[in-house]
C-alpha cells in the first residue's frame, strides 16, 4: 500500500511538472522567437526589443524596426532619435522623430508613422520585458508615396521657375532646390523598396545625374569676377582663381554680375615649444556688382606651424588653397540659397 502511495505521489508530481511546463510554454509568446502569427511578414514589418524596464523594451523594439530600413538602405548616417509611447483608444502607439545627417537626407518618421507596440510580455524568471513593434506595410507604403508625390510636385515647380528665370544666381537656386528634393526622394524610394515585397518601389521622372548637370550648367553661366581685399602673404589671387575654375565657374576677366571677394588676415603667434605658429582667418563674400549688396559671407579659421619661420607662410597658403578647393562650390550654392554661415 505504501509503495502504491509513493507511486501515485510520483505520478502526481510528474503531472504537475508537465502541466507547469505547458503553462510556461503557452505563456511565452511565439513572437519573441519567431514571426508573429497575427502580423504575417507579407502584411507587416515587425521587430522585438527587450530590457529590464517596459518603456526601454518598447523603445528598443521600435529602434530595431528602424534598423531594418537603415541596414538595407546602406546609407552612412548619424541618427539622433526621440521616441515616445502614447496610449490612444486603449492601444499603444509609438512616435519617433529622427534627424539623419547624411548626404541623402531621409526622414524615417515618414516611414514609421503608424508604427505601434502590438504586444508586451514580462519574463518573470529573469525579470525581462519584451515588446513587439509592428508596422503595416500598406500604410507605410502609402505614407512614403504621398511624400514622394509632394517632392515630385516641388521639383516640377522649381524646374519650371528655373526655365523662366533670367538671373543666373536665382536660376541656380531653383536647380539646387530641385536636386535636393530628388535626393530626398531617392532615400524614400530605397525605403519603399524595403516595404514593397516586389522590391520595385516607384521610379522618378528625373535622373539625379541630369539634374546635377543642369546645376553645373547654371553654375558655369555665373558671371563672377575674382577680387582680393587683403593678402599679407601673397598668392591669394591665384588660389582663388584656381579654386573657382575647379568649382565650375571660372573667374571672369573684368567686371561680372557678381564679385567673389577674398580676404586673408594673419596673426604671427611667435615661437612656442620650438615651433613657429601662424593664425589666419580666410573670409569669402559674394557681392552683387550693380548694387554692392553682399549676397553671402563665409569665414574659416586657420592655424599652421613649422620648425622654420620661413615655412609657415607657405604652409598657411597651402591650407588656404585646400580650404577653397574643398568648399568653394558648396559655399557658392549656400550663398545662392541663403544658407551660408555669417
Image (spheres, rainbow, N blue to C red):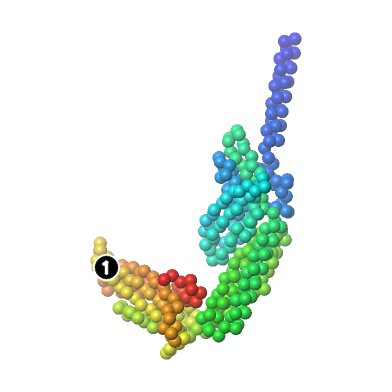
- Position of the N terminus by quadrant: top right
Which residue is pictured at 50% across the width and 83% down the height? 222
Q: Does residue 220 appear in the picture of this structure?
A: no
Q: Residue 55 versus residue 88: which sits nearer the camera?
A: 88
Left or right: residue 215 compared with residue 255:
right
The residue tagged with tag 1: helix, strand or loop? strand
The image quarter in which residue 151 lies: bottom right
Taking the view exactly as shown, the residue that stands out farthest to the front is: 89
How many circles with numbers are drawn on the protein? 1
Taking the view exactly as shown, the residue that stands out farthest to the bottom is: 254
Q: Does residue 80 appear in the picture of this structure?
A: yes
x and y percentages locating residue 67 in the rendered image: 60, 54
Mark 1 surroundings: few (<14), some (14-19) or many (≥20) residues within 10 A = few
Which residue is pictured at 70% across the width and 46% down the height? 36
Residue under pointer 1: 269
Which residue is pictured at 61% across the width and 51% down the height? 94
The image quarter in which residue 146 lies: bottom right
Q: Residue 17 versus residue 111: which sits nearer the camera?
A: 111
Taking the view exactly as shown, the residue that stands out farthest to the top is: 1
Which residue is pictured at 37% across the width and 72% down the height? 319
Q: Is residue 113 above or below residue 55?
A: below
Q: Residue 169 versus residue 93: which sits nearer the camera?
A: 93
x and y percentages locating residue 185 in the rendered image: 62, 67
x and y percentages locating residue 242 in the rendered image: 43, 80
Left or right: residue 5 compared with residue 230:
right
- Position of the C terminus by quadrant: bottom left
Q: Is residue 136 above or below residue 205?
A: above
Amino acid at each position: 500500500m505504501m509503495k502504491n502511495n509513493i507511486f501515485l505521489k510520483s505520478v502526481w508530481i510528474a503531472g504537475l511538472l508537465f502541466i507547469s511546463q505547458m503553462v510556461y510554454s503557452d505563456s511565452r509568446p511565439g513572437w519573441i522567437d519567431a514571426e508573429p502569427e497575427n502580423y504575417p511578414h507579407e502584411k507587416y514589418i515587425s521587430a522585438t526589443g527587450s530590457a529590464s524596464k517596459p518603456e526601454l523594451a518598447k523603445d528598443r523594439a521600435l529602434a530595431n524596426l528602424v534598423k531594418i530600413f537603415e541596414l538595407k538602405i546602406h546609407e552612412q548616417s548619424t541618427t539622433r532619435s526621440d521616441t515616445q509611447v502614447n496610449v490612444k483608444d486603449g492601444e499603444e502607439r509609438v512616435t519617433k522623430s529622427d534627424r539623419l545627417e547624411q548626404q541623402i537626407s531621409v526622414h524615417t518618421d515618414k516611414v514609421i508613422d503608424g508604427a505601434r507596440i502590438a504586444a508586451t510580455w514580462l519574463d518573470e524568471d529573469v525579470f525581462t520585458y519584451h515588446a513587439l513593434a509592428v508596422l503595416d506595410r500598406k500604410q507605410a507604403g502609402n505614407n512614403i508615396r504621398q511624400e514622394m508625390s509632394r517632392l515630385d510636385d516641388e521639383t516640377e515647380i522649381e524646374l519650371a521657375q528655373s526655365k523662366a528665370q533670367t538671373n543666373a544666381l536665382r536660376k541656380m537656386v531653383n536647380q539646387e532646390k530641385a536636386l535636393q528634393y530628388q535626393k530626398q526622394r531617392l532615400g524614400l524610394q530605397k525605403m519603399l523598396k524595403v516595404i514593397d515585397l516586389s522590391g520595385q518601389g516607384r521610379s522618378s521622372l528625373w535622373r539625379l545625374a541630369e539634374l546635377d548637370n543642369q546645376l553645373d550648367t547654371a553654375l558655369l553661366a555665373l558671371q563672377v569676377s575674382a577680387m582680393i581685399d587683403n593678402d599679407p602673404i601673397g598668392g591669394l589671387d591665384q588660389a582663388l582663381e584656381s579654386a573657382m575654375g575647379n568649382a565650375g565657374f571660372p573667374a571672369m576677366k573684368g567686371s561680372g554680375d557678381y564679385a567673389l571677394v577674398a580676404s586673408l588676415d594673419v596673426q604671427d603667434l611667435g615661437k612656442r615649444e620650438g615651433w613657429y605658429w601662424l593664425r589666419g582667418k580666410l573670409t569669402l563674400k559674394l557681392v552683387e556688382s550693380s548694387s554692392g549688396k553682399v549676397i553671402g559671407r563665409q569665414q574659416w579659421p586657420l592655424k599652421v606651424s613649422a620648425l622654420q619661420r620661413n615655412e609657415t607662410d607657405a604652409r598657411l597658403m597651402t591650407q588656404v588653397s585646400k580650404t577653397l578647393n574643398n568648399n568653394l562650390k558648396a559655399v557658392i550654392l549656400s550663398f545662392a540659397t541663403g544658407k551660408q554661415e555669417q
